Image: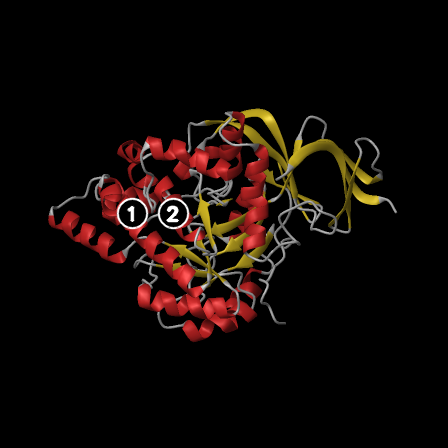
Amino acid sequence: MEADLVVRGATIVSPTGRFQGDLLVREGKVAGIVAPGTGSGADLIDATGLHLLPGGVDAHVHMQDPGLTEREDFITGTSAAAVGGTTTIIEHNRSLPFVINAELMKEKAAYLADRALIDFAQLGGAHPDNVEDLRPMWEAGSAAFKVFTCNLHGAPAILPDKMLEVFREVASFDGVCLVHAEDETITKGNEERLRAAGRVDFRVVPEWRTREAEQVAVGTTALLARISGCRVVIAHASHPEICNLVNRERARGARLWIESCPQYFYLTEDDIDTWGPFHKFTPPARDAASAAEMWNRLQSGEVDMICADHAPATREDKSRGLTDIWAASYGLPGVESVLPMMLTGVNEGKVTLERLVAARSEAPARVYGLWPKKGHLGIGADADFVLVDMQAKKTLKDEDVVSKVGWTPFAGRTVQGLPLMTFVRGRLVAQDGRPVIEPGWGEYVPGPGFQA
């Protein structure tokens, strides 16, 4: 039987190697990979000279829909993701209202059903008072549960006693928690001292959200993960000491993974002097030595996955922090720039392309239960892939941004390695920096505990 689509002559990349071949797609699935030039099908794409990667699985995005749609909505956000070579996202619970029970999860899935260009899963929120709602959310399709160890973004802190209870409950059905790890007592104390001193300058951010606050929270979280047996992902690790703390508990049997983001590989705490509120995110960037070492930790496998933490804020919102940094919201747009930024690191010899594919596609799909449907190009998997030109260069500009907010924290940087064409279930969804499909093609992908 002929394929519906043949992608001919690309260099196909997996976590274990690369080779020349023709990718065959039938009925939205990978039907096989054959020798170059031997595939036949109804449609043919000549990908000679390009690299073919599994589509990105970004497990950390906040599309702000419903609720704060002046910042982003699911249509613009999934358009930006598609342009950036991402084919599946895991939408977080921090829309309005927060998704903290099964009914709200079902309602949000229904609301988003015709608003996505790419496929999507959902997170539920773990709060101090909703432990009894976690299993029902898991069975309603949640891919994992977001936990905050500090009061942030309107979400209440889950302190160690309650965290242990949450972890034990989630472990009982082998779910996953994604933890934003900054210690509430340290950040609160820092804030009180900075405000008492009348500080409103940009340097408030790294002095408020300190390395120590992140380390204390990660140390506690990792220990409780081991004690409880819960599967836990540390969100947006900002510096290498986080890897050291996690490695200590991994060595003792904890089931732990580390997520990081391009901002911790490229930006430093000194950049906030220039960019001010447009570089206000948390945990903040650290020093240049930490950023350089994060590449080594990614290549070694200590950093398991690379995600965006896409959390856009408008120019108006950010600009409120120009005279008082406390007044600006946290967050960066980034889902469309993750792949070009990280491919630049590949071209600079900081990480291999195979390792990037593992961290961008396979690891998040496996950890969050979307494998084997997502995250790879094995026979029977969804035909989600991106064709990239490893030689192409581009200077990132605000005016090219697809995300609704129309700015990027990486403006002015030249990247090498660009996604040219993105396919979801065998269908072209973005090409040459623009979406080429209408909303509604993207499908909801419930988590592994889903019970219809």
Please count the marks in the image. 2
Q: Indicate the position of residue 74 as horizontal and vertical percent values.
A: 52, 53
Name the residue nearer the viewer: 231 or 389: 231
Residue bearing mark 1: 328
Q: CA distance from mark 1 to mark 2?
A: 9 Å
Name the residue nearer the viewer: 158 or 355: 355
- Identify whether 381 is placed above or below 271: below
- Tell me if 372 is positioned left or right of 107 in this view: right
Task: Check the picture and name the quadrant holding the C terminus.
Answer: bottom right
Is there a contact, CB below 8 Å, between mark 1 and mark 2?
Answer: yes
Q: Amino acid at mark 1?
A: Ala
Furthest-bottom residue in view? 132
- Identify whether 214 is placed above or below 168: above
Residue bearing mark 2: 313
Mark 2 neighbour density, 10 Å: few (under 14) some (14–19) many (20 or more) = many
Q: Is residue 55 visible?
A: yes
Dot 1: element: loop
- Tell me if 363 is positioned left or right of 94 in this view: right
Q: Which residue is painted at 25% across and 40% down in the image?
A: 322
Q: Which residue is painted at 11% across and 46% down in the image?
A: 197
Q: Indicate the position of residue 131 as horizontal and vertical percent values.
A: 41, 72
Q: Which residue is painted at 58% across and 25% down in the image?
A: 392
Q: Indicate the position of residue 278 as horizontal and vertical percent values.
A: 34, 39
Of callouts 1 and 2, which one flags the residue occurring earlier in the amino acid sequence? 2
- Identify whether 308 is placed above or below 273: below
Q: Which residue is painted at 55% across and 64% down in the image?
A: 109
- Identify whether 443 is placed above or below 77: below
Q: Amino acid at mark 2?
A: Ala
Dot 2: element: loop
Furthest-right residue in view? 1
Q: Indicate the position of residue 210 as horizontal and vertical percent values.
A: 26, 45
Q: Name the colouring of the figure.
A: secondary structure
